[in-house]
Image (cartoon, grey):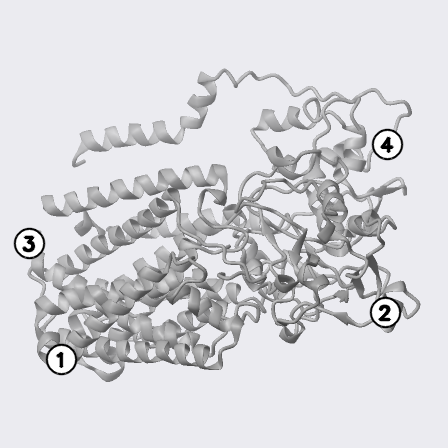
Amino acid sequence: MLEHALKGNKKYWGWLLFLAIIILIGFYFYIKQFNYGLGITGMSRSVSWGLYIAQFTFIVGVAASAVMVVLPYYLHNYKEFSKVTILGEFLAIASVVMCIMFVTVDLGQPFRVANIFLHPTFHSLMFWDVLALSGYLVLNVIITRVTLGAEHKSIKPPKWIRPVIIISIPWAISIHTVTAFLISGLAGRPFWLTAIMAPRFLASAFSAGPALLVVFCLIVKRFTKFDPGNEALKKLGLIITYAMCVNVFFILMEFFTTFYSGIPGDVSHMQYLYFGIDGSTRLVPWMWTSALLVLISLTLLIIPKTRKNHKILFVTCLMVFVSIWLEKGLGLIITGFIPNPFGKVVQYWPTIPETFISVGIWAFGFFLITIFYKIALSVRKEIEI
Amino acid sequence: MYDTGKIIIGLIIFVGFFTSPIWYDVSNGKTALKEPELVLPKLENQKECVGTKQFMRDNHMVLLNDWRNEVVREGEKTYTSYTHKNFNMNLEKTCLNCHSDTKQFCDQCHNYLGESPYCWDCHIENQGPEKK
Amino acid sequence: MDKSRRNFLKIAGIAALGVTADKFVDVHAQDTANKVIKKTIGSGKETVKAKVDRKERLAMVVDLRKCVSQKGCTKCIDACNKTHNIPDFGESKDEIKWIWKEPYENAFLDHENFYLTDEFKNKKVPLFCNNCDNPPCVEVCPTQATFKREDGIVMMDWHRCIGCRYCMAACPYGSRSFNWRDPRPFIKDVNPDFPTRMRGVVEKCIFCEERLAEGLPPACVEACTEKALVFGNLDDPESEVRKLLKDNFSIRRKPGLGTNPEVYYLV
């Protein structure tokens, strides 16, 4: 089936070439980082996790969002999702690969990563996170290989794949929960020490992931014969709407607990993020942009007419994705460190090499998605080869 | 065979890429097949090593690995050698006490084999027998 | 693909795996003439406790009444930096510090008090790793590169650290530093008795465990001319630290978090 990825028109190869260039630039900067050390990034003694881990926590959510299409289709026989489940699963694979890459570029000694497996540490959440992510990757690779392989041969997939798919549903929830536990169990970081961190991760994942899926479906529909189906898009739109409502609700809950209780250790982080402290306001405009995008997109989602209009849905879903990226991919991790444990505000901003490495990894994810979708849709003969 | 031309060219490029480290070294003149010459500095009293020559040749990497686990993780600082003598498990203070010039000793075999252990990223090399 | 070619590739793959499998099996010295060292196979069964003979709970008492750091004294910091080859990056984001000074309000962030004495408003408190009894950094380290010893020291294994900086995120006290770049060029006077660290690993104060092994006090304790730093074993009722804590009121940083820090400040 892989041979389908090698046949394409000029637009396909042009897009892949464009992504390849970005990936190579990212790789070049990674070599520089490997030789110099992580000091080439904007991270510091106070803000010791930056863009890489922030992207990781965001993309883990996107990875888990495949469950939003797998669950209705496989568990409840919601036939309308039949065309999009494979796309969701492929999105999961590309996302998990991106997660692994982001964590790897963030390590100070990447060649020692085997130590996690040679010396398993059951009380460390990071160990479980590695296991959960690797397991999820393996699950989705098996699922896509078997289901797509069966379609390719025009036969039904073997019976044993169904329990594997059912397992992937709670597993998807678990990769999020584990990633949330990574930060929500740290007594020393009050910004993250909240019981609803895992639910927040889930809510934002189930908004951002399906939103990205909708965007991809509409793009693919534009360039191929693929049509996800009106019902599928309608349902996805509805899922995104509800998930966004829950997401916003959770964030407002955080606001309340923080500001009403008024505990300085808790307030300072939220204050830095949304209002700035003593003139340190680097993240403030980004967060209010996110809030604005959330407001607009939620309005457009709640109104049925605008939700059902595919052109508007496309823009709305982009807004959802970007707003959640700003909140999770930029706001969450960095703010946990500001102010630092002795109350000082040390700001962070990614450097050029750091940005290019991150963009390179994103480009690699898109590269994988393009190839995967090309294979999936070619198998279904929805593309003119 | 279909696409014979493309495959042959592809194979040549692949083999060239795969063997590129060899060509790189040849072009740099590093393939002199000179046997490594291990030099021990002249010491006042003939001290003995923690192991026999053959044992150390075969196992010094494992020994050092074990030592570092023992010292750092177990807090054990003393090693009893095959001659029932006690040594401090310390790379700089015990090993480099005698093998003080790493260029003439450690690097000889390591360079010959293309090995670059990262000990010296942290542990401090003694350069020359005068420095202790 | 032809069935037989497929089978061949499958068998070849498994064979290749089998040939390389021995790399993952620990190969140990088998010279019978040598004493076989106690094996610590890194299978996770490795103890997180050091087999140090003395059963102790090591702690540091900082007498803030005697400390003159607000007058510019940096003797403890200089001693530590010299002994442990701490690189000097200046005031940059890459800074590494095992012991440093913070104003009282920053060191004891949760002791908000707008009516502090003038002395304490200007006080600079020496801070270092608290070597907690219940360390969150040890909880989260995925490779046990940081681990708690039986004598109470939270130790660093720089050979094993993968540089994930999870411990830095978990530490409520900001005690840990990361080697963002190669530290060697920034070390002023290399102390040949202690290794440097390489870039990509996390480091922190380890209560001078290498000096304790030789019967010496920690470098900062030795360097303090005011005798403001006292180090000892809390489990020994006759030790100086126990006596100081018995007779003087002490506070610790962020005690409410349950980390049980072992650095006590006398105010």
Q: CA–CA distance between discs 3 and 1? A: 36 Å
Q: Seen in the image, is C165 located left or right of residue B3? A: right
* Residue closest to the eye, A67 or C172: C172
Whether residues under marks 4 and 1 lie with C-beta atoms below 8 angstroms apart, the answer is no
**Visible in this render: residue B107?**
yes
* x, y percent for residue C45: 67, 63
* x, y percent for residue A300: 15, 74
Pointer 2 local density, CA inside 10 Å: few below 14, some 14–19, many at least 20 = some
The residue identified by callout 3 is: A384
Q: CA–CA distance between discs 3 and 4? A: 77 Å
Name which quarter of the figure residue B56 lies in. top right
The numbered dot on residue A303 is: 1
Q: CA–CA distance between discs 2 and 4? A: 41 Å
Q: CA–CA distance between discs 3 and 2? A: 78 Å
* Residue closest to the eye, C125 or C2: C125
Pointer 4 local density, CA inside 10 Å: few below 14, some 14–19, many at least 20 = few
All told, the count of numbered labels is 4
Name which quarter of the figure residue B65 lies in. top right
The residue identified by callout 2 is: C235
